[in-house]
Image (cartoon, rainbow, N blue to C red):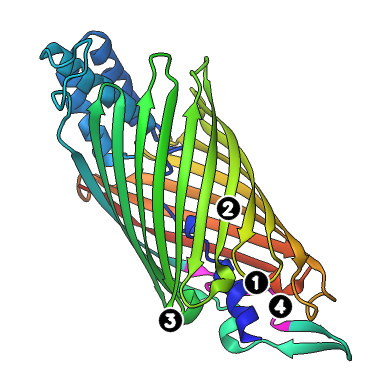
Amino acid sequence: MKKIFTLVLACSFPVSSIASPCNPLQSKACNQSIEAKLRQAVAFNVSRHYTEAADLLERVLMEYPDSPSAMKQYSLALAGIDEAMGLVHDQPQPDTHSRDWQVNSGLQLRSGYSSNLNQAPTKSTLQLTLPSGPIALELMPQFRQQAGFGAEAQLTGNALRTLAKALQWRVRGELFNRQTDYGGYADYQGSNVLTSLMQQGKSGAETGVALGFNALRYNSDVYLYTSQLMLRHSGAKGSYCQPQGGVDLLWQRQAGNSLLDSRYAGLMAGLFCDTQLGLYNASISTGWDWATSLRPGGDQLRGRLELSGIWSTDVLSQGSFIKASGNILQSHDQQAYSAWLGNGATRYVNRTGANLDYDWSLKWVADNWRGVASVKWQNQNSNISLFEMNSLEGWMGVRMAW
């Protein structure tokens, strides 16, 4: 039975759910002041004042390293500088258009409260369907919901380099840690590394490839590893919106427990809209997850819907913004999970989540300091009660960039 509990609780800690201060698909200009700087940078590029544009955009990227608009204009500024220096020609010139790495980093510290720190099942008892009849089994304390306070730290680093005209190489690294009074499944540490190449076309279309690796440690000595390959293509931007499509490949492995080993392949389609009323992103993805061993439930069919928006809130605080996001994740097993659970039912899981984040300037403390606050809600339903879960949490802290 302990193996069953370990499996379900480990599955509730996907690496992608770890909070990230900025999503590259959602975070163009995060507030009005940044938008003004970007408009000024565009004007510099149009008037061929590339050096001024590059200087301005370097300051923007220090504070918002994941802004696609800033990175795109920065690439144009660097290409313009190279052209002005005679470094861009009709024929490729080895290494003459390469530039130094642009590097920045950040640290986020926050604390908060969660109604379910270890993402445990909603019920403290488990209904077993044995041949002799149903029986209620009390979960051990470490597998029950644990509400309380915790502290989180997240250290990030970003490096950007222009390899050729409109071709960018980017590397992002992240270390994170959460500590509570409970330990076990409530605490975790991990790291994410993502490297990508992005080619920008004249029409505004973009084609890119990214390779990522994630490692997560929880319950003191349990390690979960994932690696992923992402292919993306964004079409030319219309009046406000830009379509996107891609392919996702993912490999997952848990050290010492092959029950969680799997491979996933899926397709995604999305739409990003940059309007005067805010920034909006919508995406839908579906794919197949192959179990590489005797995983309970066998292979899975998965689907995911994500929606998000970012709005300037200068009326509350100069340079502040609100980000809201929601997602629905569904998975359907292809085999019975266990004869002892739900009379051998084929499991399905439906998880709904919503986030609300507020980010504001703390320049009265120091430059490049910002306050961060967030509220997160999750609810998971299933035809097997062991996989039903809900949580509500709130966090507040600071984010520093240099």
Closer to viewer: mark 2 or mark 1: 1
- Sooner in the amino-acid sequence: mark 3 or mark 2: 3
Q: Residues within 10 Å of mark 3 (few under 14, many from 20)?
A: few
- Residue at label 3? 181
Q: CA distance from mark 3 to mark 4?
A: 22 Å
Could you tell me if the residues under marks 4 and 1 are in contact, i.e. CB atoms within 8 Å? no
- Sooner in the amino-acid sequence: mark 2 or mark 1: 2
Circle 4: residue type: Lys
Q: CA distance from mark 3 to mark 2?
A: 35 Å
Question: Is residue 24 visible from the viewing direction of this image?
Answer: yes
- Residue at label 2? 264
Q: Residue at x 54, y 51 (%)?
A: 355
The image position of residue 84, as x and y in percent, is 14, 12
The image position of residue 3, as x and y in percent, is 61, 82
Q: Residue at x 19, y 11 (%)?
A: 89
- Residue at label 4? 123
